[in-house]
Image (cartoon, grey):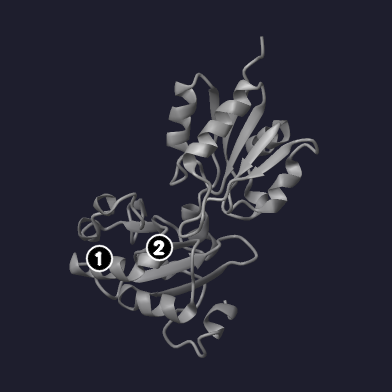
Amino acid sequence: MTRLGKVYLVGAGPGDPELLTLKAVKAIALADVLLVDDLVNPVILDHAHVDARVIHVGKRGGCQSTPQEFIERLMIAEARAGHHVVRLKGGDPFIFGRGGEEREHLLAAGIDVEVVNGISSGLAAPSSIGVPLTHRDWSQGAIFVTGHGKTADANPDWQALAKLNMTLVVYMGVARCAEIQAALIAGGKSPATPVAVIHAATSDAQAQLVTTLGQLSEAVAATRLASPSIIVIGDVVRCASIPSYEGLMETDQRLSNY
C-alpha cells in the first residue's frame, strides 16, 4: 500500500531570503515537490534538494493566476502518491495567503498538513523603514486588512476603521488607494494622518514613500508605486527614516533618493 505523503504550507517571508525561518529551510530541503507562488524569492529554492520538482503556480492580484482549485487538486494528488509537498507562499500562509482554505481542503481529503509560519510583509515592510506598528505614544494596536475583498460586499468598512485609533496595515490596496483614501476621510480620519507605502519590501526592488492620507492617491500616481505594496496608515509613520513626499524634487528622484 502506498504511504500517504504530507503537505507543508510554508511562508517564504517578505523577500529577503535571510528572513526565512529555520523550520521553513528544513521543510524545503525535505520536499519532493514544491508548489511556488510568484512572489517567492527564487534564491530560497537553493535550499531544495537537487531532485525536487519545482512547479511555479504564480498567484498575483491583477495578473493571470493558476486556479486555486488546480493547486489544491495537485497537492492532494502528490501527497497521495507518497510525496512530501511544500506549498511555498510569500509572507505567511495564514495572513492573506489562502492557507486556511488550503488546509481545510487537505484535511477533508485525509492529507496530513503542517503550517510553517513566515514573516508577513505587513510586519516587514514598515520595519524596513523604521516604522513600528505599535507605539506607546501613538498606537495601542494594529489592524491588518485587505484592500481587495473577494467581492464588493466583502470589502472592509473603511469608515468604521477610520474611527479606531490604531495603525492600519493594508495589503493589496494600491490599485484602490483613492477609494480607501476617500472612505477613511469620509469616516473622520484626518487628511494629515501620516501614510507610508512600501513596494517589494526587503527585496532588491524595494521602493517607498511617506506622505499624508490627503495626498495618498496623488503621491502613489506620481511615484508609480505598484503591487506588491503595503500601505501603513497612522501616526507611527512619523518614525519613518525616509523623507516625506512633500517637497521632494523630481518625480523620478522620489524613489531613487530613498
Q: Say what amino acid the circle numbered 1 marks.
A: Leu
Residue at the location (65% across, 22% down)? 81
At numbered mark 1, what does the secondary structure look like: helix, strand or loop?
Answer: helix
* Distance between mark 2 and mark 1 Cα atoms: 13 Å
**Residue 143 locus on image (x, y percent):** 34, 51
Residue at the location (48% across, 41% down)? 68
Identify which residue, 180 or 256, lies in the foreground: 180
**Residue 46 locus on image (x, y percent):** 75, 46
| Count of numbered circles on the image | 2
Q: Which mark is residue 232?
A: 2
Q: Is residue 243 left or right of residue 37?
A: left
Residue at the location (45% across, 41% down)? 98
Q: Is residue 159 above or below residue 58?
A: below
Direction bottom: furthest residue:
249
Q: Which mark is residue 3?
A: none
Identify which residue, 218 or 256, lies in the foreground: 218
**Residue 118 locus on image (x, y percent):** 55, 43
At numbered mark 2, what does the secondary structure look like: helix, strand or loop?
Answer: strand
Q: Say what amino acid the circle numbered 2 marks.
A: Val
Q: Quadrant of the N terminus?
A: top right
Q: Is residue 258 left or right of residue 136?
A: right
Badge 1 crowding class, 10 Å Cα cut-off, few under 14, some 14 to 19, many 20 or more, is many
**In front: label 2 or label 1:** 1
Q: Which mark is residue 184?
A: 1
The part of the image, by quadrant, that contains residue 246 is: bottom left
Mark with earlier residue (2, 1) = 1
Q: Is residue 161 left or right of residue 150?
A: left
**Residue 107 locus on image (x, y percent):** 47, 23
Contact, mark 2 vs mark 1 (Cβ under 8 Å): no
Q: Is residue 258 above or below residue 72?
A: below
